[in-house]
Image (cartoon, helix red, strand yellow):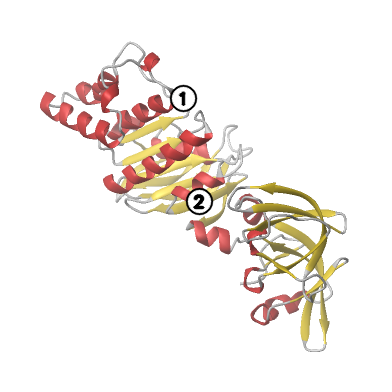
Amino acid sequence: MASITIKDMSVSYNKGKTYVIEDMSLKVNEGEFCVFLGPSGCGKTTAMHCIAGLLKPQKGEIYFGDKIVTAPLKGIFEQPQERNIAMVFQEYALYPNMTVRKNMSFALETKKAPKEEINRRVDEMAKMLSIEPLLDRKPAELSGGQRQRVALGRAMVRNPNVFMLDEPLGNLDAKLREQVRYELKKIQRKLGVTTVYVTHDQTEAMTMADHIVLMNNGRIVQEGTPSDLYDHPCNLFAAVFLGTPKINTFDCKVQKKGEDYFLVHPSFILPVPEEMEESVKLFEGKTVIFGIRPSDLILVEEGSEGCISGTVDGVEPLGEAFLVYLNVGGQVIVFKYSGDKTSFSGQLSLRPNASKFHIFDKETENRIND
C-alpha cells in the first residue's frame, strides 16, 4: 500500500493557454478512502488519470509513498503498468469470451503467478464479493450489478498499491448502487488499500469517504472529512453542493440593535448567536448570505420570535420524515421534519438551530462565521 502526494500539479490541453487543473497539491494517506467530488468538468477525472499515469501534467510532482512517479520538469514519468495500480470505470470492460474466473485471474496469469496462488486469490475475492456461484459464467449471463462486482474483483485480486474507481456505480439502479457502495467500502477497509474514487454524487462521497476532495474549475475548493465539509463549508459552493435536500439560503442585512446583532430579511429577523457576533459585526450594514439546512429547522408555535414563517407550498413524505416546502416571501424553502405530525397546511413557523448557522460574504461567497 502507498500514500499519494501531489505537489503543485497543473494540466493543460492547449499548451498552457488554459488549465483544467492548476497548482493542485494534495496528500492521500496510506489506506485512506479518498473521494474526488465535484460537478462535471471540474477536473476530478483528469487528476485521477494523472495519478494513474494515463496523463502527463505540464508541471508538478506525484509521489507514491516516498517514490516519485511523475515529475515532468525532472524528466521522470513512470508508465501506468509500473505503478501497481488497479482501475475500475463506469463501463465494466470485461472480456466477453472469458468466464468470471478467467476475467479475474487474467492479470495474474500474465504476470506468471503460480496457479495455486491465482486460484486462492480469486476464490477469496469471489467470496468477499459474493460472486462465488458466478465463477463459471460469462459476462453476458450476468446482471449489471454482478458485472460491476466482477470488475471490482478483477482489479482488487491483484493486490494493488493504489485502487482507483471512476464513477464505478453510475450504471447501477438506486437499490443496487446502495448495496454495492456498502460492500465496496467494507472490502476496502478489510484490505486497507489506498483508494481514490471519482464521483459527482455527494451521497456516495458522504457515505464512503474518509477524505473528500471537493473540486470546481480545476481547483480544490475544500478537503477534509465528510462532517468537516458538511458542518463547516468554506464557501457557498461547498455548502450548496453537499447536502440533500440542498441548503436554504437568504440574502439578509446585518443590523445592530443595542448590543446585539441581527440578520434582517424582508420576511423575518433572526438574532445572531453570541459566539458568531465577533465575525459577523464586521459586516454591519452589509448584505450577507444566511444558510440553514432543512434538517436544522425546528417547528415551533406560530408567531414565536426569532423564527422563519411561511405558507405550506407542498409536502413530500419520505417514510421516516417529511419534506415540507414553505413559501417565505415568494421564496420556496425546504424543511425536513421527523416528528409525529403527519399533515401540514397553512402557516408554519420554524426556528433555525442557532448552532447550525452558515453565514457567507455576499461578494466573495466565503464563509464568515467559524
Residue at figure coordinates x 63%, y 61% from the top left: 339
Give the SS element for disc 2: helix
Image location of residue 148, percent across then percent down: 40, 28
Residue at figure coordinates x 34%, y 34% from the top left: 86
Q: Which of these two is toward me, 91 or 47?
A: 91
Up-down: is 46 above or below 62?
above
Give the SS element for disc 1: loop
In this rendering, position of residue 311 left or right of residue 300: right
Res 206 label = 2
- One can see residue 317 in this view: yes
Up-down: is 104 above or below 323?
above
Look at mark 1 in the image and give the residue it sits on. 91
Q: CA distance from mark 1 to mark 2?
A: 23 Å
Residue at figure coordinates x 54%, y 46% from the top left: 203
Image location of residue 235, percent across then percent down: 65, 59
Residue type beneath disc 1: Glu
Q: Nearer the viewer, mark 1 or mark 2?
A: 2
Image location of residue 170, percent across then percent down: 51, 32
